[in-house]
């Protein structure tokens, strides 16, 4: 195929040997050669591909205008163009800004990574800690006012002699029944649960304008012991 691919591609799986298709959205940073996609989720109807990672632009090819989407976006599964759905992920201060994981439940897209704000360009959004939610049936003003308080782990920083070296945040998400499972370099707020945690969605009311209820499941004694062999090891958990 006479096609350039930048961080995304699609394969035709209808044959015994999958073949590369011409679907080639360009997901990039300041140039076409930087930026990355860490997570993908697809809509139930198969028409939309939600992407998260470390990027700021999406465009289907060199002849179409670039669309600004910071670290989170939606792409037409047929054309490869960015849709009108707009949500952005920011970090106000500190190092580390990326989306690592996406999971879709109904019209709510849960977003995990290392960030402090979910917003659109038309409003300031909401302060969230490494885990948040966005409505997929609203193109704008779609961030959910929901902050379960997921913190990044802290490690010893030899340059400062303090425990202020932050981990990489949420790295994987999965929904099982009414629970949202989170794996990564994280600590669940107000609990002792690290690296792997479960949030009870059964008591969360995700309604227009915000949400209420819900809690981390330490009270249910679900606290698996997942530990790295050292503070410099990457936490890689698949859900």
Image (spheres, helix red, strand yellow):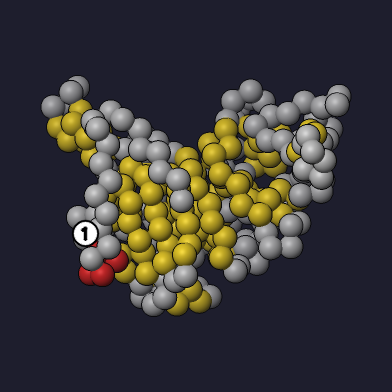
Q: Is residue 41 left or right of residue 5?
A: left
Q: Position of residue 228 (x, y in %)?
A: 27, 36
Tell me which residue sits at (28%, 46%) in the image.
Answer: 226
| Residue 171 occupies quadrant | top left
| The N terminus, quarter of image | top right
**Residue 93 seen in render:** no
**Residue 233 seen in render:** yes
Crowding around mark 1 (Cα neighbors within 10 Å: few <14, some 14 to 19, many 20+) is few
> Which residue is denoted by mark 1 in the rendering?
191
| Residue 96 occupies quadrant | top left
Tell me which residue sits at (39%, 54%) in the image.
Answer: 182
Q: Is residue 84 above or below residue 144?
A: above
Q: Nearer the viewer, residue 51 or 225?
A: 225
Q: Is residue 222 above or below residue 234?
A: below
Q: Is residue 10 above or below residue 45?
A: above
Q: Position of residue 89 (x, y in %)?
A: 50, 48
SS at mark 1? loop
Q: Is residue 107 above or below residue 195?
A: below
Q: Is residue 139 left or right of residue 91?
A: right
Q: Nearer the viewer, residue 11 or 70?
A: 11
Q: Nearer the viewer, residue 227 or 32?
A: 227
Q: Nearer the viewer, residue 193 or 190?
A: 193
Q: Position of residue 131 (x, y in %)?
A: 41, 54
Tell me which residue sits at (62%, 63%) in the image.
Answer: 136
Q: Is residue 198 left or right of residue 193?
A: right
Tell me which residue sits at (68%, 50%) in the image.
Answer: 49
Q: Position of residue 137 (x, y in %)?
A: 65, 67
Residue that protrudes farthest toward the left in the picture = 161
Q: Is residue 175 left or right of residue 158?
A: right
């Amino acid at each position: 195929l006479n096609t350039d691919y930048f961080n995304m591609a699609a394969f035709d799986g209808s044959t015994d040997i999958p073949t590369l298709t011409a679907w080639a959205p360009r997901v990039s940073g300041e140039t076409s050669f930087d930026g990355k996609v860490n997570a993908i989720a697809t809509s139930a109807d198969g028409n939309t591909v939600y992407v998260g990672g470390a990027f700021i632009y999406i465009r289907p090819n060199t002849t179409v205008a670039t669309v600004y989407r910071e670290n989170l976006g939606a792409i037409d599964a047929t054309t490869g163009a960015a849709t009108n759905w707009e949500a952005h992920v920011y970090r106000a201060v500190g190092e580390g800004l990326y989306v690592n994981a996406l999971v879709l439940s109904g019209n709510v897209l849960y977003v995990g990574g290392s960030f402090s704000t979910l917003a659109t360009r038309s409003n300031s959004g909401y302060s969230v800690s490494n885990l948040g939610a966005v409505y997929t049936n609203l193109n704008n003003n779609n961030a959910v006012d929901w902050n379960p308080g997921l913190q990044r782990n802290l490690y010893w920083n030899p340059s400062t002699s303090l425990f202020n070296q932050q981990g990489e945040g949420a790295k994987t998400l999965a929904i099982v029944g009414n629970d949202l499972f989170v794996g990564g370099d994280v600590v669940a707020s107000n609990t002792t649960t690290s690296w792997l945690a479960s949030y009870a969605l059964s008591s969360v009311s995700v309604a227009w304008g915000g949400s209420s209820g819900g809690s981390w499941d330490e009270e249910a004694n679900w606290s698996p012991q997942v530990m790295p062999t050292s503070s410099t090891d990457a936490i890689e958990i698949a859900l």
